[in-house]
Image (cartoon, grey):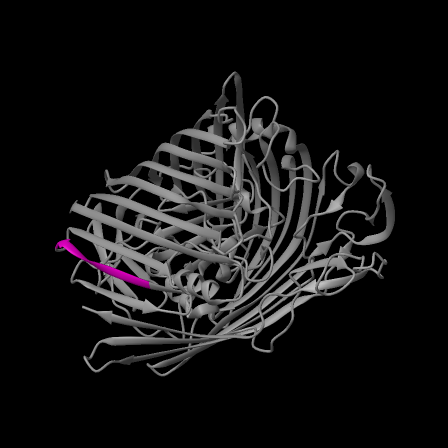
Amino acid sequence: MNKIFVFIFLIVVPFVVSAQYKVSGFVKDAQTGELLVGATVVELNTLNGTVSSTNGYFSLIAKGKQLSVSYVGYQPVEIIYSADTLLSILLNPGSELEMINVSGQRYQSFNTSRLQASEILAIPAIGGKPDIMKTLQLMPGIQSQGEGSSLLNVRGGNPGENLYLIDDVPLLYVNHLGGFMSVFNPDMINSIEVYKGGFPARYGGKLSSIMAISQREGNNKQWKGNMGLGITDASFNIEGPIVKNKATIIVNGRKTLIDPLMLLGSGLADQDFFISYGFHDINSKISYRPNTKNSFHLNFYQGDDYLKFSNKKQENNNEHFKLNNVWGNWLLSGRWSSVLGARLFANHILSYTSYRLKVYKWYLENNTNNAQESEQIFRSTVSDLSFRSDWQFKLTENYSLEYGGKLTRMNHMPNYVYNSSSNNEADFDVLNSFETSAYLNNKILLFGFIDADLGVRMVNYRINEFSTFDFEPRLNITGQISTNHSFNVTYQKMNQYSHLLWTTGAIMNNEVWIPSDDDLSPSKSVQYTLGWKGLFDNGRYETEIVFYNKQLSDLAAYKEGYSNLIGGGEWQTKIEKGGSGKSAGLEMLIRKKLGDWTGFVAYTYSNTTRIFENINRGESFVFDYDRPHSASVHVNHKFGKKWSAGASWIYQTGLPYTPVIGRQYILEENGETVEGLIYGKRNSGRMKEYHRLDLGATYNTTNYKGRKVEWNFSLYNAYCRRNPNAYYYGGSELSTKTQDYDGNYQHIKLYQVSFFPIIPSVSYKVYFN
């Protein structure tokens, strides 16, 4: 297969077409100067066209001198240009057209979900605050781990197999509150592209998905902002020109309101401890455009979760303890983008990101004669220092090249452990790995109706004495069957050089990243897809069907009996290695993007399994988050200029669990008899199915000062379905024990844990200039 790709690269080069005009430029919002990502640029009366990139940039070689530029929610424009020129195209927001011209529809993307900020804001959410991750869970092939979770499983993968990029910079941890909310604030988002397959050659390092988030640059005309208040957090956003039409800044932040309330409530409650939880995010971006051909961007992000727990001082109680758990991210990056001609565009990024998890425990027993004090510290960190350079070169009307490379230094400290009660110093390992990659992608138009992306990514990974070189071919072919119908075939091979170990079910984060080495091989995946897409009713409706098959190998997980790396013993001994997996499925999507009524219907059928030598006796078992059937329906309607409303209904097969098939009596060393449960095959049972209805409405008005005000009302789980989050076995609904106080054994029963009933919420946001 690899030789075939090399052969294609060498011999498939289309002939240069005479009488061509080289045109490139940027597509922007006329009112704010914001770049528009995914705008359609088409040469009039032809199928020759392209879309603007995450930089708002496009490049086209045309035979004529007229272009049509369009973007959903904006008034389309027609441009007449001179030869070999760099354009700045401004689109004005306007009502969406009921009829559209589909002449450029061969530029349809498969295995990709693209969402604009306006679409994200239309999805009902808990707290009245839209959440990007929960919006993505409505898309086919993307599923949540459980009730209320923002963690994503894409086509049978785990959350650690998703690459999250903010302006092409990786962010290592993307959730708050144990996965209940994501770190992405919609006020910063321009657009988001999710690749489930057919990955572009420039992306690598993860097995399951690429989530490329483009952030806004801020208004370059005037200063403006907003402040919001919801039941979970307060937020602010401010943006404006530092130098008008040349330099802008946007700053965004949010902070929970529940932590002081939890501390106060636990202090007043009839309980023996204080508890508080909270998180914050702060996000900023500075953009500078000294001229039409160059731009510089500086990004910053910092976010933390913190959980604190301590006991109350009481008489006759000589024991005191406290627990502090902190986890979060830092991100800092600089980017230089440059147009080096109508044919050539370059993008260079220097970035640093880090993630750390810290658990601090303190205990004091103050007796009359002496005091015993101890403290424990657990810390896990990972950092990423990278430089990447990406280039786009438009050779002819039918042929363009994308190429570049990336250098990465990763620093891992998986398991720092300190215990004052032992005389030993802190035990930890520091592991440095280096990843060097280069890629080449050929974008070719064959015979006027076949778009072929033929790419390859080459990676060298080194850590200590271990080194490996991997060759990752990419194939993405789209053929135009007719004006409104197309098919797609993809093939890709991926490698992942760090493994995520995680345990669900706890608010305290315990995600730990560990690097591959000579003992722990890099994970691998091979994926094939076959798809069809059709447009109906003059492009008002879009339908897509995709079949996929994915093979996974060299997976890692906790060994049975372990849920984290905290505690004594070598951390390497707690890891199960060499796992494999299979995932296959069918995805369908019907979408209406135009008119007052918009929405979509999505359905996924899938089957995902895992095999580990020392788990489930080495037999294949259903993946922990396998859901064979998953469906979602979303509708949104605009009622004039002030009101809009949306509804989302979700259905999923219940999660698998391991059932108990009996119990046995175990004789302990002290002579007492205790009960032990006998479990069946792993994940051989199913929880009951999951479904819920979410409703939302937005009301736009002005306050007494004439400022724009937005009220958001939402109803989560509108018919109050008791969806299962977990099952457990016990003698009663309040206890997992099957012995009563007299030592008599009770009949064992299966009980369900449900988290969220119907939850109404409201949020308020005021805008100012």
Q: Position of residue 719 (x, y in %)?
A: 60, 78
Q: Residue furthest top?
A: 465
Q: Quadrant of the N terminus?
A: top right
**In the rendered image of this protein, does residue 415 appear above or below residue 250?**
above
**Measuring 38% from the left and 64% from the top, which residue is drawn there?**
257
Q: Is residue 84 left or right of residue 575?
A: left
Q: Is residue 481 magenta?
A: no
Q: Camera-side residue: 767 or 21?
A: 767
What segment is highlighted magenta in the picture?
235-243
Q: Position of residue 107 (x, y in %)?
A: 44, 54
Q: Quadrant of the C terminus?
A: bottom left
**Measuring 63% from the left and 42% from the top, which residue is drawn there?**
563
Q: Is residue 237 magenta?
A: yes
Characterize the magenta stretch by its predominant secondary structure.
Answer: strand
Please identify the quarter of the rendering in which residue 603 is found.
Answer: bottom right
**In the rendered image of this protein, does residue 240 appear above or below residue 682?**
below
Please identify the quarter of the rendering in which residue 168 is found.
Answer: top left
Q: Is residue 99 left or right of residue 271?
A: left
**In the rendered image of this protein, does residue 347 appear above or below residue 26?**
above
Q: Camera-side residue: 502 or 327?
A: 327
Q: Is residue 85 left or right of residue 753?
A: left
Q: Is residue 17 visible?
A: no
Q: Is residue 92 visible?
A: yes
Q: Residue furthest front?
A: 369
Q: Position of residue 431 (x, y in %)?
A: 48, 25
The total of numbered circles placed on residues is 0
**In the rendered image of this protein, does residue 757 appear above or below residue 652?**
below
Q: Position of residue 149 (x, y in %)?
A: 54, 58
**Measuring 23% from the left and 38% from the top, which residue is drawn there?**
340
**Measuring 15% from the left and 51% from the top, which residue is drawn there?**
246
Q: Camera-side residue: 627 or 314?
A: 314
